[in-house]
């Protein structure tokens, strides 16, 4: 009997121990104490600092050069000389002009480079048929700061031409130059210096200045086989006077002569008038 009671008591104790073990394993408190949760706070220095990409600086938008208005301080007289509006103004000025272009890029660029060297500007009187052939040379001269002049469409004598043909010879050049440069010519020189009353009135009504010249280089009398750049200079110096309106052409021997010619003129005290400073009405 005692043996059975002991056995029963032992069995009950084992069952109680087993239940106690189950509760220990499954209780939340036991789980928490066995595996404590540690919250880790990351150090600011441990985390990589986000890199802010620099804002690119926008490239400046190209703008067309601002062309400042030139004060009209000179006019042309009936002899086609350049005269200061102020009687006490500088009379020792020269107007440089080149006719019958555009012909050749190398010649145009050489003329522009020499003019730049002497801080001079010139009027390039161009024929329409040549402009149509080489519009890029019109842009070259215009963008260099020199002036495009109207020399009629063809190099024909306008004096005895019917009025409607004169209109076309003048107007077609005005139109094509404006299409290329955005500006219509303001100066007109008739081929051979030959015109009539209708032509002169038309030019005036179109607010252009009609001119021939007052100092001829005679470079047009020379040929590829028979030319002399020194003679070009000599011709100009022989006719030199205050306000000389010098006629030259886009010719190789004139290009060769130009730098020395401008140097000699400067040594004599002359300066080169900006065509933009000339009034568009003759006095």
Image (cartoon, grey):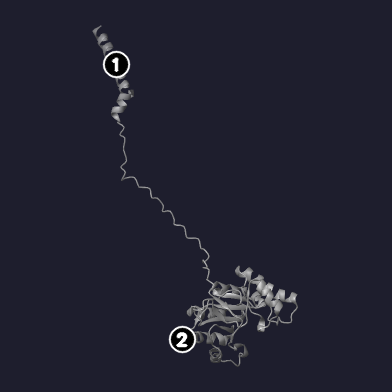
Q: In the orientation shown, which residue stands out farthest toward the bottom?
A: 226
User: Foreground residue, 148 or 222?
Assistant: 148
Asked if residue 232 lies left or right of residue 9, the reply is right
Rounded to the nearest whole Å, what is the CA distance between mark 2 and mark 1? Answer: 130 Å
Camera-side residue: 81 or 21? 81
Task: Name the residue carrying label 2.
Answer: 267
Q: Residues within 10 Å of mark 1 (few under 14, many from 20)?
A: few
Q: Residue furthest front?
A: 87
Q: Which numbered mark, 2 or 1, is in the foreground of this view?
A: 2
At x 66%, y 82%, the residue is 191
Give the quarter of the figure containing the C terminus. bottom right
- SS under mark 1: helix
Q: Which mark is first along the chain, 1 or 2?
A: 1
Label at residue 44: none
Q: How far across and down, in percent of the image, does residue 62 sit?
A: 51, 63
According to the picture, the residue beneath numbered tag 1 turns out to be 16
Q: In the picture, residue 162 is in which quadrant?
A: bottom right
């Amino acid at each position: 009997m005692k043996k059975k009671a002991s056995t029963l008591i032992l069995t009950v104790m084992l069952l109680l121990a087993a239940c106690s073990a189950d509760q220990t394993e499954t209780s939340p408190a036991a789980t928490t104490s066995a595996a404590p949760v540690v919250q880790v706070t990351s150090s600011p220095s441990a985390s990589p600092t986000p890199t802010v990409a620099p804002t690119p600086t926008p490239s400046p938008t190209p703008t067309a050069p601002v062309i400042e208005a030139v004060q009209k301080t000179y006019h042309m007289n009936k002899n086609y000389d350049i005269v200061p509006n102020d009687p006490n103004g500088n009379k020792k000025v020269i107007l440089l002009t080149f006719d019958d272009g555009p012909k050749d890029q190398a010649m145009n660029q050489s003329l522009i480079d020499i003019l730049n060297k002497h801080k001079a500007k010139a009027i390039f009187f161009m024929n329409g048929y040549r402009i149509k052939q080489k519009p890029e040379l019109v842009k070259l001269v215009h963008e260099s700061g020199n002036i495009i002049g109207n020399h009629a469409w063809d190099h024909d004598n306008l004096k005895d031409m019917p009025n409607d043909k004169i209109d076309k010879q003048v107007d077609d050049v005005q139109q094509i130059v404006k299409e290329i440069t955005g500006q219509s010519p303001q100066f007109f020189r008739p081929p051979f210096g030959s015109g009539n009353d209708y032509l002169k009135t038309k030019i005036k009504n179109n607010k252009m200045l009609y001119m021939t010249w007052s100092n001829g280089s005679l470079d047009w009398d020379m040929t590829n086989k028979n030319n002399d750049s020194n003679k070009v200079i000599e011709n100009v110096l022989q006719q030199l006077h205050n306000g000389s309106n010098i006629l030259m052409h886009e010719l190789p021997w004139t290009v060769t002569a130009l730098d020395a010619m401008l140097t000699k003129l400067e040594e004599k005290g002359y300066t080169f008038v900006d065509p933009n400073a000339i009034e568009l009405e003759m006095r």
